[in-house]
Structure formats: structure tokens, C-alpha cells
Amino acid sequence: MNMDSKEVKSVEMRIKSADGAYRWYSYRYKSIEATDNTLPLFGGAILDITDEHEKDIRIERLAYIDEVTEIANRNKLLKEGTSIYDSSKLLHYNFWIIVLDIDRFHIINDTCGYENGNTILKNFAHILYKFVTPGGLAARISGDNFALILRDYGDDDLPVRTVKSIQDEFARLAVDQLSSINLSCSAGYSMLPRDGKSFRDILDHAEFALKSASGSQGCICAYEPSMHDSIIGNTEMEKALALAIEKNELQLFYQPKIDLATNKIMGVEALIRWIKPDGTIISPDVFVPIAESSHLIGKISDYVLNEGCRQNKLWQKMGYPNIVMSINFASTDFYQTDLKDKVFEALARSGLDAQWLEVELTETLALSDVNFAIAQMNKLRELGVKLAMDDFGTGYSSLSYLQTLPITLLKLDRSFITDIEHDNIAYEIVSAVIRIAKSKKIETIAEGIENHVQESILRMAGCDYAQGYLYGKPMPPAELQKFFEENAKI
Ligand code: C2E
Ligand code: MG
Ligand code: MG
């Protein structure tokens, strides 16, 4: 047998030490050819990798477990769901995906306090978990949204029956002071692989059914392809939006970002607003998704890119301190092959130096086609443009991608910051993320800071920058100039 090998191999092992504790070791070795009747020789080194191992487990936990309810999070749902989808196609099994939403949760949360809100979430997760059957999964998608994947055995009533049982148990839940509150949940469901081209598609469809169900409390609604016909409202909105773009009703507001070390403004985020002639302001959460599902987003993004650069250069010419202008990109913009040219042209046209422009991308956007995204990101980095990962912690996998994506800034999602004051775990996560980001030379900013307690906690955790209503809401350029002047006095 020829066992000679130039290749370094490795095995990992767990060994119990004398004190009874387990430690992890990695044995990296090369094997040397064994002549007849002699045993092969191995040469190498044994390394104690217990710390790395613990870090990996922690990262895995951060990436896949929901900290509040301790059940699977959205990342895990997407990962497992995709593999369930693939095997259901291959093996001709069916699964149900049920998406559940706690009725009036935000009101309960506001009126009964955060602690009680969390208790309800935990209990709800606990109830869901009881209904998981082999091969299935219970997960918290976000806020008060949960999902349950169930294997189908040819019983079409299973989703409705399961949700009714969940509703019964949930209604019985007496949470001390909350006993007077009527707890209920609504649900939407779809079947896989039947109801879509991918797991995400099917999950979207279940969520779509849930939205159709959420008219009244306790509704349960199955996904039907014909539901899409009812989105006529969107087409109307699309027409109105197209007209609004022509009439220049879209404007950029700017929200300041603060350097926590100096309390000085170090950047702004450009946030789009649709201002109707009567002065009503429409939020991007309403019209950006509609623009994204049509060709309109391209026009909006061209405007945002060019206007953002122009405004920043103008402020520089007016003598205000140099700051970074961050703009948000939608997936269709980001995946355009001429993205680099467009950004280059916007910089050239405005005369803005690339170091003062930053593009914000969400995890979901960056990870929907990782290789292409990395290539696009590198092209932008070649220009000297900065790259921020927006809403970090809400999307897919996260921490492991910090290694691969060439980002310069990590924006911790507002949901972490809201929790940080009262929730030790949120604090632990945030400080771990900041530490890991630092070790990768990635700067960090916290979104949605609303009070000084949150600010000092984040400063303590080593966060570089901050953004939120505490410093300023998104505002028109003239108001931001006043902000610059006030800030200069600090
Ligand atoms: P985002 O990029 O994560 O922007 C942050 C959002 O959080 C903004 O909402 C901002 O007003 C809000 N915010 C900031 N600080 C606080 C705070 O302290 N408390 C609270 N409660 N909220 C805070 P906005 O402006 O409504 O934008 C919503 C989303 O719409 C943005 O999320 C972004 O994803 C999208 N968006 C905005 N402008 C554009 C754009 O020009 N292009 C594209 N593609 N998307 C945009
Ligand atoms: Mg953003
Ligand atoms: Mg954000």
C-alpha cells in the first residue's frame, strides 16, 4: 500500500482531560510511505482548537437560533426549507408551510410592556414546537411572525386543524397580568413543492395568504394562485408613481450619522420620500417595493445616486465638513452589469471623490447570488466607493459572510438596538458582532438609536458610529445644513 502523501491532512478530535473537561484538538499530519512489514509513519502537530470550536458554535448559534424564543430563526428556516423543498421534489413528498402572526402583538407589547411581550413570544414558540413532526421545523421569522413546516400525509385539513389547536392553546395561555388579554393568531399556508418555484417563493406565498387573512383576528387562509389577481391596487400605485417621478415629486431626505468618539457628524444616509403636491409624504416602505417589482426602481436609483453625489459635493463646496453619503440600492440596481459605469459617471458628473460615497446593501440582496454580488462589490471597491451591509442581523446567515463579502461597514439592525437596554442577550450579540467585525477591520454603526442609554451601551460595546432619531430624523437638505451648523458647536 502506498501511503506516501505530500498533502497535509487533518483530523479533529475531542479528548477528555484529567479534570474531566473535554477539549478539542486538531491533528495536522503528513503520512510517509510504509515499506514492507513496517507501519506507516505520520508526522505532524497537535493543536488545541477548543477556543475556535467554541467560537464556531457560538457563531452557528448566532446565525441560526432566535435569541428570544430559542427556536430556529429565519436563516435556519431558509436553509432547512430549501433542503426540504429539494428533497420533496426528488422524493415526491409534500410539506405544508404555515406562517403565523400574533394578532395585535404590537399593541400588547406597547401596553403590557416588553417583558410580557417577550414572554408571549416564548410561549407561542413553545406551543408551535409541540406541533413539529419528524422532518418538520418551527421557526421565528421576525417580530411576531412564525413558521411551521409539517409533513403532509394526504390530509388537506391538516394545516387548518393544526392552526386551530395552536389557537386554542394560545388562547388558554394565562400570562399573569395578561389574563384579561385575548390572545389569538392568524395564519396563511401553502404547500411545497406545489405552490412555487423555490422554497422562498412558497414562503412568500404563505405570507401572501397570511396578509390576505389578516383582515380579522384568528383567520386562517390557504394560498391560491388567483390571489395575485387582486393586487390591482399596485398597478394603480405604479401608474401614480411613474407620474410622480416625471413630476419630480421624489426627493431625498438625509439622516445624520454620528461618530461616537467625537460626537461629530461623519455621514448621512439618503432616504427617498415621495412628496405629493398637497404635502403628504409617502414612505419608501410603501412605494419602493412597488417600484422594485416594475422598471421604475431603475429610474429612482439613478436619481438617488446622482442627486446624492451632487448634494454631497455641493455641501463640500459650501464649506461644510467632508462626510460620507450613503445610498440604498435595490436588488435590480445592484445586479445590473453596468453598475460600476453608472457609479463612475455619477461621481465624475458631480466631481465627488469616491471615498465620500457609500452604497448600502442588505444581506438578502448580497446573498441572493453571492458570487456575482462579490464581483459587483469588488468593482465598486475598485472605484474607491465604500460598502455597507444594511439591516445586519435580519437577513440570512450573516457572520460567516463577513469573511467573504468586501464590505467596509456593518449596520446593526434597529431591532437589536431596541432590545439592547433591557435584554442582556441582545447586548451580548451586539458586542460579539462588533468584536468580530473589528477583527475583520470592518467598521460598525448602530441604526435606530433613540435614547442616551442605548448610545452609551453601544459606545461601551465599541461601536464606531450611530444613527437614529436621537441625533436627527431624515430631513430635507436645508434642515441638514442647520444640523451641520449646530453640530459644529459641539
Ligand atoms: P433602511 O435603509 O434600513 O433605512 C433606515 C430606516 O430607519 C429609515 O426609514 C429611517 O427613517 C428609519 N430610522 C432611522 N432612525 C430611526 C430611529 O431612531 N427609530 C425608528 N423607528 N426608525 C428610524 P425610511 O426612510 O422610512 O426607509 C425605509 C427603508 O426604505 C430603508 O430602510 C430602505 O430599505 C428603503 N429606502 C429608503 N430610501 C431608499 C432608496 O433611495 N432606494 C432604495 N432602494 N430603498 C430605499
Ligand atoms: Mg439603509
Ligand atoms: Mg437599515
Image (cartoon, rainbow, N blue to C red):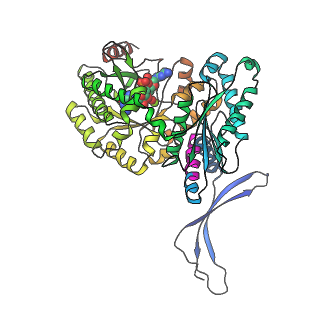
Which residue is the extreme one toward the left? Answer: 349
Q: Residue at the location (75% across, 23% down)?
A: 175
Is residue 77 magenta-colored?
Answer: yes
Residue 475 occupies quadrant: top left
Residues drawn in magenta? 74-84
Q: Residue at x 42, y 41 (%)?
A: 407
Q: Quadrant of residue 17?
A: bottom right
**Where residue 100 sits: x, y (%)?**
61, 34
Give the main secondary structure, helix, strand or loop, of the magenta stretch.
Answer: helix
Q: Which residue is drawn at 61% across and 85% down?
A: 35
Q: Where is residue 148 in the image (x, y as percent from the top left)?
A: 63, 41
Residue at the bottom extreme of this rendering: 36
In the rendered structure, does residue 103 fall within the stretch colored magenta?
no
Q: In this view, does 401 lie above or below 252?
A: below
The N terminus lies in quadrant: bottom right
- The tally of labels here is 0
